């Protein structure tokens, strides 16, 4: 049989070539070729180990490493011919290596399988992606800290049920996002420890008869641990699912962040201004300035959620060990990592440029009886039970709705009709500043607490 008609890595068993459509259908090279750098990295470490284990000569090792290095140069220069008939990134690189250095290139695969090779490549690739994503999270958090520090005393309405609840510092609100991202960072750091376990040496499923030394490749590739079971080593994709779960949480946080930015840039809120470079216009309505970046990030969260569901579904029915199903792990994983990284990058670029409309925020905080709880707390300090105070303030709010007056706009006589315990010192607690400053404890919205939280945030980032 002609060598051109079968894959040289396994064609000896077959008496006819694979159907042309099936070859295209089963090939993965169109998407897994992005693993080339990590595939070459793993192959160089494997060749180095084989020489130290006495399987390869020093000359063979050097020829393999030199050939792989030149192939990486070809790929990065756009001069590499990717062949669908060779199925995947691994066989494309191995075939090119054999073309370059001859029969020695065929010795590279000694003691390993594409099963443990691809499992290793994905882990190496994802480890690098996580490191990049962690850097973008930190960059976004730095932007939030800078904004929070600058606007610690800017007052805006805080909401529950999207109804005005209590006044808060704009800086305090931004730090809520900082906290979400801190949890995302922690989850990804923790996920990385399980990504960074080496399956190389598991071979096809049972290990290898060659005298390999897995400790060598583990050290060369920077893995923290060696996979303890060869069956699990080639078939485990928990690490990819775990990453997509962490990525889904992070995208959910960015989506919530996006929703608030979309609301705040609307004419109805008008709380902030986004720079033009993060927005687009309308083809028909010349007045429009659309917050496309947060809207798109809000939408892209669904892609990452879908990747998580896809991988869970992919793995749920697989027996041990490797199955061809696992070829479907890469595209959702790649897309999830790309989407999270790019979304974080967009936000890290955009957040430092957000401009709050300070007076608009303040005026909004004055509406909606946002200091009602402060009046209730005031009456509690006068010796009344909280539930009675709650009812008293409820009557005062009802009067305010009917008269069109906020609590702070009522006269002392108007307030005293609801409780004789109210005296002229009440106005100190009904101001926005009084309300915000009164929440002076760790995690509270008082400006000095916001600045203290910013300082803690800076310490956290510096320790990473």
Image (tube, rainbow, N blue to C red):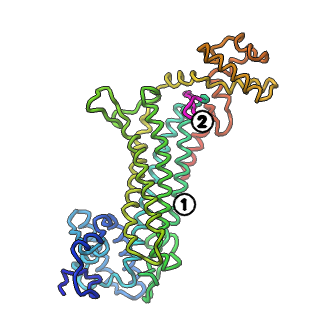
Residue 198 as seen in the image, left or right of residue 369: left
Gap in angstroms between the C-alphas marked 1 and 2? 28 Å
Residue at numbered disc 1: 190
Query: Is residue 422 rendered to the left or right of residue 32?
Result: right
Look at mark 2 in the image and give the residue it sits on.
450
Spot the residue most to the right.
383
The image shows residue 193, relative to residue 375, as above or below, that is below
Residue at the image point whose x is 41% and y is 61% from the top: 333
Closer to the chain start, of discs 1 and 2, is: 1
Counting other residues with Cα less than 10 Å from the Cα at mark 1, is it few (<14), some (14-19), or many (20 or more)?
Answer: some
Q: Secondary structure at mark 2?
A: helix
Circles 1 and 2, Cβ within 8 Å, touching? The answer is: no
163 in magenta? yes
Depth check, front residue: 342 or 210: 342
Range drawn in magenta: 152-164
Q: In this orientation, which residue lies closer to the viewer: 90 or 44?
A: 90
Q: Residues within 10 Å of mark 2 (few under 14, many from 20)?
A: many
Type of secondary structure dominating the magenta stretch? strand
Magenta-span inclusion, residue 131: no
Residue 148 in view in this figure: yes
């Amino acid at each position: 049989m002609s060598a051109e008609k079968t894959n040289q890595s396994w064609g000896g068993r077959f008496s006819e070539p694979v159907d042309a459509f099936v070859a295209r259908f089963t090939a993965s090279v169109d998407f897994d070729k992005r693993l080339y750098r990590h595939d070459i990295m793993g192959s160089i470490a494997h060749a180095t180990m084989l020489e130290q284990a006495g399987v390869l000569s020093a000359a063979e090792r050097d020829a393999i490493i030199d050939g792989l290095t030149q192939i990486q140069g070809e790929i990065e220069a756009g001069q590499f011919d990717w062949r669908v008939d060779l199925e995947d990134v691994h066989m494309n690189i191995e075939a090119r290596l054999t073309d370059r250095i001859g029969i020695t290139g065929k010795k590279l695969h000694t003691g390993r399988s594409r099963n443990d090779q691809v499992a290793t490549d994905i882990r190496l690739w994802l480890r690098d992606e996580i490191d990049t994503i962690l850097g973008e999270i930190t960059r976004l958090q730095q932007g939030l800290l800078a904004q929070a520090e600058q606007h610690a005393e800017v007052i805006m309405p805080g909401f529950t049920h999207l109804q005005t609840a209590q006044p808060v510092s704009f800086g305090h609100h931004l730090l809520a996002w900082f906290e979400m991202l801190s949890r995302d960072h922690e989850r990804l750091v923790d996920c990385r420890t399980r990504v960074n376990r080496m399956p190389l040496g598991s071979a096809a499923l049972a290990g290898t008869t060659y005298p390999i030394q897995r400790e060598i490749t583990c050290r060369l590739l920077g893995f923290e641990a060696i996979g303890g079971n060869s069956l699990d080593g080639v078939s485990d994709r928990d690490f990819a699912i775990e990453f997509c779960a962490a990525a889904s949480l992070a995208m959910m946080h960015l989506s919530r962040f996006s929703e608030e930015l979309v609301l705040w840039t609307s004419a109805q809120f008008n709380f902030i201004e986004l720079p033009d470079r993060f927005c687009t216009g309308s083809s028909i309505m010349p007045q429009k300035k659309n917050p496309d970046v947060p809207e798109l990030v809000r939408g892209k969260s669904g892609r990452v959620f879908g990747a998580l569901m896809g991988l869970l579904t992919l793995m749920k029915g697989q027996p041990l060990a490797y199955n061809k199903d696992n070829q479907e792990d890469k595209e959702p994983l790649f897309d999830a990592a790309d989407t999270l990284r790019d979304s974080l990058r967009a936000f890290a670029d955009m957040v430092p440029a957000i401009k709050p409309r300070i007076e608009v925020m303040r005026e909004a905080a004055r509406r909606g009886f946002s200091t009602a709880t402060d009046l209730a707390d005031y009456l509690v300090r006068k010796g009344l039970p909280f539930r009675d105070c709650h009812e008293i303030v409820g009557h005062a709010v009802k009067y305010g709705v009917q008269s069109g007056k906020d609590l702070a706009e009522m006269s002392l006589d108007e307030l005293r009709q609801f409780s004789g315990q109210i005296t002229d010192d009440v106005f100190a607690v009904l101001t926005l500043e009084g309300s915000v400053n009164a929440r002076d404890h760790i995690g509270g919205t008082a400006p000095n607490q916001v600045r203290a939280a910013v300082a803690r945030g800076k310490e956290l980032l510096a320790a990473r």
